[in-house]
Image (cartoon, rainbow, N blue to C red):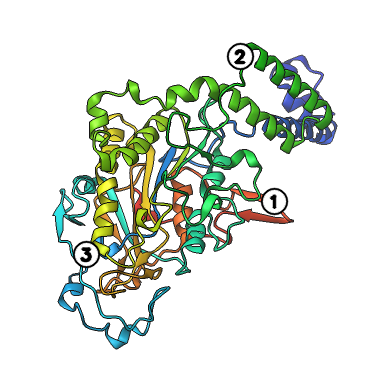
Amino acid sequence: MNSSTDLSNAATLGATSRRDLLFRAANGFGALALQHLLARTALAEAAANPLRAKRPHFGATADAVIFIFNVGAPSSMDTFDPKPMLNRRAGEPLPESFGSVGGQFTDGTNPILGTPWQFRRHGQSGLPVSELFPNVARHVDEICFVRSFVTHSVVHAPAMYEVHNGRLFATHPSIGSWVTYGLGSESENLPAYVVMPQPEGTPEGGTSCWSQGFLPSVYQGTLLRPGPNPILHLKRPAGMSEARQRDMLDLLQAMNEIDSGPLDSEMQARIAAYELAFRMQSHAPEAVDLTKETDATKRSYGLEQDHTREFGTRLLLARRLVERGVRFIQIYSGGGPLSMQWDAHKHLKQNHEKMAGHSDVPIAALLQDLKQRGLLERTLVIWGAEFGRLPTSQDGNGRDHNPHGYTMWFAGGGVRGGQAIGATDEFGLHAVDRPFIMRDFHASILHALGLDQNQLWYLHNGRHEKLTDFGGTVIQDLFA
């Protein structure tokens, strides 16, 4: 080594960091050892706290998601995708050019069913919304309607799985689990992923709609139930003080680490779950306590009206949870008995007026509340379902399932509102302009959160599994 590169030279050492020294000494073998040690340290830190907050892959437009899922499937042509041709041709068969496309219970030969509701244009954008949603209609300039989504089953449960986890079967992780796995939690005291089903029962797809699948169990959605104890098993056992419970958990953690070692991710995930539950005992009751909300806020969400109180309570809780760092919130409109779902195989008018009646006011209040508090710009709000409904009749006054083209909408979280993307045909049967599948839906949500769908993977059975499988297309026009 000549004098110009002599590392023993004091001046050179003064300008050389320890890491530079390792990279330059012994032909770089010192750097290899350093990288190995750093990698092991990173793995140990990740295992010790699998819910730690992580950096997104690139700049995110949203920090949190509130996904309102309408169980049973609303009719797009009766809500957000007007089709005047339905009323002009009501009672006639679909033109032969459309073929014999039926739903789950009809064969495509049923006559066209007109819509019972009028559409009116709203906002500066002039977007049309059915009179079923007069309050949501006031926010069309914040909303982007995507009118050309497609799923691949006419049966509720498989289509729900496709919307929630990208597959037609129940074994893969839900999108909320993937997001939690990719970004961790912003809150040290609350779950990163919260699920609020309707009190009457779980959706037809069941708990698989918020399952972690093959991901570690720490990424599963946490269920919030109605009533004074929304999270089960949160109260301390009788006679157990906080200090005693803290000592017990510390001892349990020390014993677990003796058995597992610092890199046993499953054991560390279990320890992290215990720790989170301990912190939630102090913080969760405050987060779900609505007594601190003003009377005006509670009125705006419909808490003083019988038909909006329950759903409004859950949406108000969602806003409180987003404020406190919860990352992904899944809320179900509909569930349990057929009478409490959007599944209008008959009596379309009565069904949709009931279901929209319980959700229109609370959804509008949520959008307004988030906007007033400066939260909407960083919170992605999604309204959707497992499929749409056919333009033809079932039982004379209902509609069967239609996965070939339907509407979901997005607001906040960097979304460019006041626009509609994609289109179905003149009867609302098929997506004909820019059809999007669920891989595109999921890729777009991940994109808003700063996650690259191809970098978010998990090694399972020797395969790098991804939410979008072999890839979806981000709906770029969705974002401002």
Up the image or down, 458 lies above or below 325; here it is below
> Whole-percent x and y of residue 322?
41, 33
Say which amino acid is labelled 1: Leu
Q: Which residue is mark 1?
A: 459
Count of marks overlaid on the render: 3
> Whole-percent x and y of residue 366?
30, 38
Residue found at x 30% / y 81%:
110
Give the crowd class for mark 1: few <14, some 14-19, many >=20 residues within 10 Å. few
Q: Which residue is mark 3?
A: 82
Left or right of residue 153: residue 17: right
Earlier along the polypeptide chain: callout 2 or callout 1? 2
Q: Which mark is residue 242?
A: 2
Earlier along the polypeptide chain: callout 2 or callout 3? 3
Up the image or down, 431 lies above or below 337; here it is below
Label 2 vs label 3, nearer the camera? 2
Residue found at x 52% / y 53%:
206
Q: In the image as oriented, which residue stretches furthest toward the bottom?
A: 96
Label 2 vs label 1, nearer the camera? 2
Residue 377 is at least partly visible in this image? no
> Whole-percent x and y of residue 439?
49, 59
Left or right of residue 259: residue 374: left
> Whole-percent x and y of residue 134?
18, 49
Residue 277 is at least partly visible in this image? yes
Say which amino acid is labelled 2: Glu
- Tag 2, which secondary structure? helix
**Marks 2 and 1, how far apart at CA:** 39 Å
**Marks 1 and 3, how far apart at CA:** 44 Å
**Marks 2 and 3, how far apart at CA:** 58 Å
